[in-house]
Image: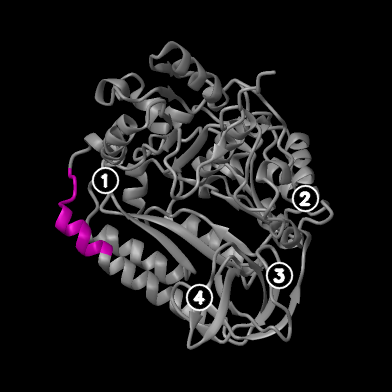
Amino acid sequence: MSTPAASPPPRTYQVRTYGCQMNVHDSERLTGLLEGAGYVAAAADQTADVVVFNTCAVRENADNRLYGNLSHLVPVKAAHPGMQIAVGGCLAQKDRGDILARAPWVDVVFGTHNLGSLPVLLERARIAEEAQVEIRESLEVFPSTLPTKRDSAYAAWVSVSVGCNNTCTFCIVPALRGKEKDRRPGDILGEIRALVAEGVLEITLLGQNVNAYGSEFGDREAFSKLLRACGDVDGLERVRFTSPHPKDFTDDVIAAMAQTPNVMPQLHMPLQSGSDVVLQRMRRSYRQERYLGIIDRVRAAMPDAAITTDIIVGFPGETEADFEQTMHVVREARFASAFTFQYSKRPGTPAATMDDQVPHDVVQERYLRLVDLVNEVAWAENSKQIGRVVDVLIAEGEGRKDDRTERLSGRAPDNRLVHAAVDPAVGVPRPGDVVTAEITYAAPHHLVADRVVAVRRTAAGDLHGRENAPASVLLGLPTVRA
């Protein structure tokens, strides 16, 4: 009697993600698809059988970064017969067949509108022994209907829309992700309830222009209604959203934030520039006065709200006077933090061909001044937190150890980063548990809480502790096969 042949081990994968939160969310879908098709995540010290690049096309050097990373895999692939490389995301949507011309060792190219095709394309490429390229021009299946493997047991992204109807001159996203497509509220709330049933405590509503939600089905108050509906989901402790656009930010949203207890006192609202002239050239349909007016109304409704932003320095035509207007808004708005960027040309955007490109040395000098001011303001705002008692949702990672004090890191309700002390007498928290502690020290980019009041163990913390169960089972992934 012959011994049956042993089954080959499952193929392994690695997903490398670049860019925005939408790409992070898409990568969760890609990993869910791969695991549903029988792949398993490669160990840190293991060469994966499939490497997937989920790309971004926002920065000028995005393609250089991609092709540099692809070139590093040439000898790796040569040494591992059967290895496959896939490129997806915004850069794949933009460059299409050019990727194979520049990197013929790539096996699969797929776009932003057909994430679900990846397992089938990999199998086709393997069987046919030739590269597969599939770029759809419009969304056919909303990404949130795809299986997911989340990195976190306690927090999740929930997409409310994809695409964008704006025409900012520095941004290529609308050309790559298309016009805005909105999910129905019932589908969104159904996903949120399912996530909470799995132990999720915090969700972040995600969209390219999240507060324009509802424009596709004609309800201008749809987003504020969605926020209020989140307040009725039992077990959902924290609700955040990103990123809104000032032109669509209305008072009904401010009221919903202030009146819904589980909507966190935090707002990330991109400024980009404080100069009305530059905002016009950017095709951003608001001006400094409107922006600061929104900040004032948010703070009137939620005095403790932490407000963060995005700022671009050195946009074409920006003068020193324009830059000083940006500095003025930073001083007035009192941002808790800001993502600051030196302008770089995005191929395919109107701004890339504008006259009056600002010299790099001027951009660099302004950028450093801006960073200094942002840090100064952030430190002053963080210092106001000393003495406050906050609930810190403990995150993944080992935390910090200073002066022999062990600390774990997490986020306060206003999304400030807090390094909370571990006090065994009170309890040792796990990722997903909540520590109540007093803020004792402030720095520009974090807070320290060394007096622990309480530790609350949660279902998310319990789930994180089940280390021997595969994440695809823990998170209720449906089984799909290519």
Looking at the picture, tell me which residue is in the foreground, 458 or 112.
Answer: 458
User: Which residue does the numbered mark 2 point to in the structure image?
Assistant: 196
Q: Position of residue 397 (x, y in %)?
A: 55, 64
In the image, which disc is placed on residue 311? Answer: none
In the image, 18: left or right of 187? left
The image quadrant where one finds the C terminus is top right
Quick check: is 126 in the magenta stretch? no
In the image, which disc is placed on residue 400? Answer: 4
- Compared with 306, 152 (above or below) is above
Q: Position of residue 336 (x, y in %)?
A: 49, 69
- Compared with 136, 348 (above or below) is below
Q: Secondary structure at mark 1?
A: loop
Q: Secondary structure at mark 4?
A: strand
- Compared with 293, 28 (above or below) is above
**Residue type of the residue flagged with mark 3:** Val
Quick check: is 360 in the magenta stretch? yes
Q: Which residues are magenta?
A: 356-367
Q: Earlier in the sequence, mark 2 or mark 3?
A: 2
In the image, 417: left or right of 219? left
Q: Earlier in the sequence, mark 1 or mark 4?
A: 1
Q: CA separation, marks 2 and 3?
A: 16 Å
Instruction: Place residue 75 in its image quadrant.
Output: top left
> Do the residues bearing badges 3 and 4 touch, measured as CB atoms within 8 Å?
no
**Residue type of the residue flagged with mark 4:** Arg
User: Which residue does the numbered mark 1 point to in the structure image?
Assistant: 344
For mark 2, does the 10 Å Cα neighbourhood hold few (<14), some (14 to 19), or many (20 or more) residues? many
Question: Which label sits in the foreground, 3 or 4?
Answer: 4
What residue sits 56% from the left and 50% below the top? 242
